[in-house]
Image (tube, rainbow, N blue to C red):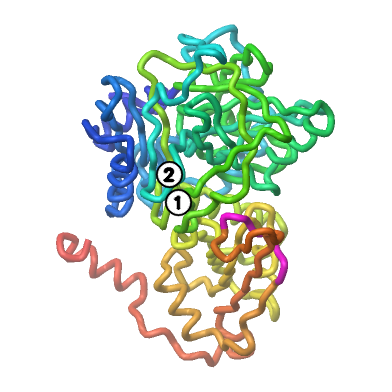
């Protein structure tokens, strides 16, 4: 029987989830839309499997694409080294204070530099590099091309301090496979690094891992606190340092056990038209403005490499569950760390892509407590990007249940008194409401869906059975009531 100790790369991860019955292989799909459509159908299932695509049309057997890696509680529990049998509620409980512990432990897990690793089994120089040697999917019907970077980790550094950042930015194959555009939002840490390199050197070094232990997808795809290396944060999660090699050209790190990696340079005037691409908001974005494009110097890959795909789209999508779980835990920890009392739970709902719809449940302790919770949550660094709605509910409401949250809005919110709008906050060009050529601001609403403070004692009683009664009845007829 395999255990979490056996997971030291993507292949070890696959072996564990396969033994758990969480992996299914799909043979013969076409890279043009079929892999994306099959993955989309899978995400809509109650508990989606991980899908490993092999024998892809036009490619030899062994060149594979993985999707759905973190799309349910069991596999996310494996990825975060929290257990192999966790359900949704157990995963949330296991994550309580997890992000705070990983932040505190990151400095104790510096990367371990090694001379070589599996990713360096094959090293292809620039004149022979072709990203289309791999079965890069066209994920959505209206995408503007083939996107190799969806589950990727893009590594940049601060040119002064050397501090590393990893981000999951979309990457479209350009120039027939000889280059790849990297679409980095202007407010992201990586974008700041690139700007600083341009000002200092006229170009910016970049390395990218395109297939890896899904823990790197988790840390690259969520807001790790500024100043903390995502690789060190990942080391704190897995309990040992991440091993890296140095890129031959840029000197930036590359995870030694990656399946596929590239390195090269970004230049201010080297841009290609990119997109459109089906984004996590559920709409296509891009396709107008040229995007910074990586001149590839080296391609590294293992024998029979596996591309890690994490295509977004209308929720639920590949990483919406992972993002909801991770963002919820990070925001809850951050909210408690502000000193706000009475925090019961936080949930970043999948319907908003894990960003745009946030529910906070509290035990009201004083007048103004609910609004304070709403304002704090709406602007925490872990929650501020692209947030649209923060709904604060009483602790008797399950923040994870969109039905219960909206029931509270309908019965405890006076629209004239309990909804306020914060304007010109941190938005994104991926927002379908964003207008071309305008700064990517957004507005957000904070909604007080708590019982009025002045009526706590007199507010009508909720018409539902007590938890003790429900548990007693459930135990009497478990086969029927679950």
Where is the N terminus found, in terms of image quarters?
A: top left
Q: Considering depth in this image, is 190 or 392 the residue closer to the camera?
A: 190
Whether residue 455 sits left or right of residue 78 in the image: it is right
Horizontal and vertical percent position of residue 241: 59, 22
Asked if residue 354 is among those painted magenta in the image, a careful observer would answer no
Which residues are drawn in magenta?
423-430
Q: Which residue is drawn at 71% across and 30% down?
A: 267
Q: Which residue is drawn at 33% across and 49% down?
A: 40
Q: Is residue 6 visible?
A: no
Q: Label 2: few (<14), some or many (≥20) within 10 Å? A: many
Whether residue 422 sits left or right of residue 34 in the image: it is right
Horizontal and vertical percent position of residue 22: 28, 37
| Residue located beneath label 2 in the image | 311
Horizontal and vertical percent position of residue 293: 61, 33
Helix, strand or loop at disc 2? loop
| Residue located beneath label 1 in the image | 278
Q: Considering depth in this image, is 410 or 384 the residue closer to the camera?
A: 384
Q: Considering depth in this image, is 42 or 1 the residue closer to the camera?
A: 42
Q: Residue at x 83, y 33 (%)?
A: 199
User: In this rendering, is residue 165 above or below 262?
Assistant: below
């Amino acid at each position: 029987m395999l255990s979490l100790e056996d997971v030291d790369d993507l292949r070890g991860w696959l072996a564990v989830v396969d033994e758990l019955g969480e992996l299914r292989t799909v043979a013969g799909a076409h890279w043009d839309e079929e892999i994306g459509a099959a993955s989309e159908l899978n995400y809509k299932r109650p508990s989606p499997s991980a899908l490993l695509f092999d024998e892809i049309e036009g490619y030899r057997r062994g060149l594979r694409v993985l999707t759905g890696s973190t799309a349910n509680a069991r596999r996310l529990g494996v990825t975060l080294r929290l257990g192999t049998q966790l359900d949704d509620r157990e995963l949330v409980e296991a994550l309580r204070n997890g992000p705070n512990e990983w932040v505190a432990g990151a400095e104790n897990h510096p990367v371990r530099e090694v001379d070589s690793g599996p990713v360096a089994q094959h090293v292809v120089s620039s004149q022979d590099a072709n990203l289309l040697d791999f079965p890069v999917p066209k994920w959505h019907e209206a995408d503007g091309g083939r996107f190799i970077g969806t589950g990727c980790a893009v590594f940049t550094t601060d040119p002064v301090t050397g501090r590393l950042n990893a981000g999951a930015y979309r990457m479209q194959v350009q120039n027939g496979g000889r280059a790849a555009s990297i679409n980095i939002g202007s407010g992201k840490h990586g974008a700041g690094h690139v700007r600083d390199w341009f000002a200092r050197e006229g170009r910016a070094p970049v390395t990218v891992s395109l297939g890896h232990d899904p823990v790197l997808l988790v840390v690259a795809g969520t807001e790790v606190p500024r100043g903390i290396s995502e690789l060190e944060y990942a080391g704190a999660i897995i309990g040992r340092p991440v091993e890296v090699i140095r890129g031959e050209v840029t000197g930036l790190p590359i995870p030694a056990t990656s399946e596929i990696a590239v390195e090269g340079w970004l230049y201010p005037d080297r841009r290609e038209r990119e997109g459109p691409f089906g984004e996590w908001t559920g709409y296509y974005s891009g396709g107008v403005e040229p995007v910074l494009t990586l001149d590839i110097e080296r391609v590294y890959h293992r024998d029979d490499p596996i591309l890690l795909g994490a295509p977004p789209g209308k929720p639920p999508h590949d990483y919406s569950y992972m993002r909801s779980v991770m963002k919820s835990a990070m925001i809850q920890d951050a909210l408690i760390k502000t000193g706000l009392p009475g925090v019961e739970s936080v949930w970043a709902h999948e319907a908003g892509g894990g960003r745009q719809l946030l529910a906070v449940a509290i035990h009201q302790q004083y007048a103004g407590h609910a609004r304070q919770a709403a304002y704090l949550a709406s602007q925490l660094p872990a929650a501020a990007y692209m947030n649209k709605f923060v709904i604060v509910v009483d602790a008797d409401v399950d923040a994870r249940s969109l039905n219960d949250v909206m029931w509270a809005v309908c019965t405890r919110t006076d629209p004239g008194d309990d909804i306020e709008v914060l304007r010109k906050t941190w938005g994104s060009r991926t927002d379908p409401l964003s207008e071309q050529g305008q700064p990517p601001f957004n507005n957000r609403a904070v909604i007080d869906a708590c019982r009025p403070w002045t009526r706590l004692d007199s507010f009508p009683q909720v018409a539902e059975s007590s938890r003790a009664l429900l548990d007693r009845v459930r135990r009497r007829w478990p086969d029927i009531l679950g």
